Image: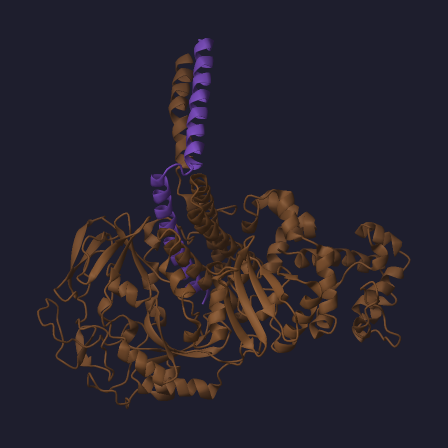
Chain colours: A brown, B purple
Amino acid sequence: MHKRIFALFVLMLFLAPSAVFAQESAPDSSGGGDGGSAPESGSSDGGGTSDSGSSTISDSGSSTDSGGTGEGGSVPSSGGGGEDGFESEPRDSDAPQPPTTTQESFEQKTCPKDMCMNGEECVPCPNFEDTRTSCPSAPPNKCAPDQSVKAIFDNNGCVIDHECGPSGSGRPRFDSVPPGCHVEKGEFGDFVKCDQRDDGFGDMERRCKEDGGKLHKTEKGPECLFDNRGQGGFFGQISCPSEENLREHADKCVNGGGNPEKFIDRSGCKIVSCVFGGGQGNFEGMSDDPRECESRGGDFVLIKGEPRCFTGDNNVKIKEKLDEIEPTDLLKIALRLENILKSLEEIGDSFEDLKKFYEKRGDTEKAASFDRALTKIDGAAARLDEIKFGLAEKVGDITEEDRYQVIRDIKDIKNIMQDIAVDILTGGKSSRSERRGSQPEGEFEDEGIDFMNAIRQCEDYSEEEPYSFSPDKEVNVELRGLRDGKCVMAITPPEFVGTVEFLLPPKTYQFFDGPHLLLSPDVDCSPEEACTMMRRFIESEDKGRRPTERFGEKERMEPKECKDVGATGEKCFDLMFIKLGPPPECRGLSLQECKEKTFRNPEERRGEFRDDFEDRDEFRQEPRNEFRMPPECEGLSPEECKNKFGDGEFRQEFRQDFGEGGFREPTSTGEFRLSEDFIPPEDLRFFEEPTQPAEPVQEQQSQETSTQSTEGTA
Amino acid sequence: MKKIIVTFILLALVVSVVAGCQAIDEKNKKVDSQEDAKETVEDVSVNLDDLSRDLDSVSEDLG
């Protein structure tokens, strides 16, 4: 017996530390959170996911079914164009390969001149000139997925073969810089830059410009985008291209030998994107060619000897027709976002460590760069958190519009991450920042669009070097960088001395898509009187009346956990803080500090909204969100207020606040009084003779706290 | 015999506590040198790249 006990304890002795180590050394981001991880949960660690980006290329891949031939021809194709070609669904990479040219010494099967590879067969090439490079198409990569791949270049820098590494070597190691490229040692990573040479896009760019489009280097290759430029201006109502415009753009694309596809852009407008040559050209299947990365607008970086291509595309394109999605899939996506959020939190912690390290060393510039990265990552995480809550709670009734908004914001978050990575690898001197910051004003083709891009990178500007533009006559808008982590936007309205200053938190400015967001309650504004005028101006210009509340905001402030236990407002906040920890934007803050940040000046916010929205139609349409305690209840708890009006006085107030006619007459106290000729609308008549007096009181209570929570969102 | 058992229990506890502290210390590792900084930046960039690809696949699934 004693021996057994002895053996048991010896075993315990050995197992205890190993159990602790095993727990601590588990992959950082694989923790399934509260609900465990779904099978699909995207691990942020393993390299397995790192190639997923390439697998998505075919999704919006294009094909050219025009039947013309002739390498140098620019004659419009006779086949496959027009409406049919435009409406056809995107197909996978069944597009003919770009034409082979001078290089004849390949081991792979090549096609005669003017013929292109399509699978194993040679077919006539489409009638566009692919002059991307003087290289022939790359031979297929025959290495196994678990092998490393090394590209073999010829003297012209063209890929002629691949060398496979031993099995299990995983991500390819980069040890041969192609001719014409060189390594630039960065502080934290080595950037491979290639000499400027004709990448073959010149002709494509010229043709695109002639047709009224603009060539963009995107992650999926170059494309001619007929976007929504010059429509509506900054303050004006968005004006999307008409169906006729779209058809015209599509025709031009087909005539130029491209393959048009319709997408939804950032503003929710349909746009035409024209893809030439399948978008991959010589680089298809390549992951270790710096020129391929550059052709996609990316930065090629070597990290610990491994190549990575960091790309970022400010243009958002979403598939026009979204696929059906099951509610369970939405829940799984919410779980994946939860895992991503955990990883982002750890990344934020690392940035904080780095910032402190450089502060201690007195390197303020570098400390500031990590502080910027931290602000960006917290803003992105805050938005992602909202999306997660929104998906989980609106799972049954998510609309197509919601999905567009979510996809758009997720694409933005992805771009933010790529930007941050490049920025920190260069020690805060990212070439992207330089590109953005040094662009001469005259070069902007459309100030409104560029301004939208600029504000999303607000941290690149400062009081001394602001970004400024004039969206309308006598109106000047300036971006003055960050103040306390918020983007400072100064607007000089017409006939106004001085400026109106808006302070936008990261989760707003990083996802800015129009001035309607300046009306959002988490945006600070000063001076007050000018803000009221400015808000009216924005409202009058924004005829589309886009909602200021974004997908998931409300669900995040009052999630199901709170509703289940009847907690609202600050009570709900406390509950969620204890249960889930501080939200991303409250990094390093105590519960009280975070609460103050989130529920700042609720009374003031309400006052602003009452003043500003008194003429708004939505105010009447959505009275529930704006309902508040009657003035007689000032300083009283909801329960005391309920008692005060227990005799029915409350119900009278209730009618006053909800009545249609009474809204336009604010009293000196700022509350809305019933007009003389007020007649309650039909659907509110039942309040006059309530059968259960307690119910409206109950409802009022919850409305009051709910209003607090949404209005005070920071 | 009882003494031996108690001793082992205590030993096991001490070892567990030490191991736990080490693990926590490892997790809360701060950046103390330029080398640490470089390594942290490299790790974070790789993580960001991987995460952004995860997000790519999320947006694909949503569409």
- Residue found farthest to the left: A105
Q: Quadrant of residue A705?
A: bottom right
Residue A325 visible in the snapshot: no
Q: Quadrant of residue A355?
A: top left
> Nearest the camera: A380 or A487?
A487
Q: Going by the image, does A39 lie left or right of A508?
A: left
Q: Going by the image, does A134 lie left or right of A703?
A: left
Q: Going by the image, does A49 lie left or right of A703?
A: left
Residue A218 picture location, percent across and down: 35, 69
Q: Is residue A665 above or below residue A569?
A: below
Residue A472 visible in the snapshot: yes
Residue A14 picture location, percent across and down: 37, 24
Considering the image in quadrants, where does the N terminus of chain B appear?
top left
Considering the image in quadrants, where does the C terminus of chain B appear?
bottom left
Badge count: 0
- Residue found farthest to the right: A647
> Nearest the camera: A430 or B18?
A430
Residue A78 picture location, percent across and down: 28, 91
Q: Is residue A456 above or below residue A80?
A: above
Q: Going by the image, does A382 lie left or right of A24?
A: right
Q: Quadrant of residue A680?
A: bottom right
Q: Is residue A705 above or below residue A401?
A: above
> Nearest the camera: A41 or A492?
A492
* Residue at 11% across, 72% down: A103
Q: Is residue A301 above or below residue A1?
A: below
* Residue at 40% across, 60% down: A433
Residue A246 picture location, percent across and down: 44, 84
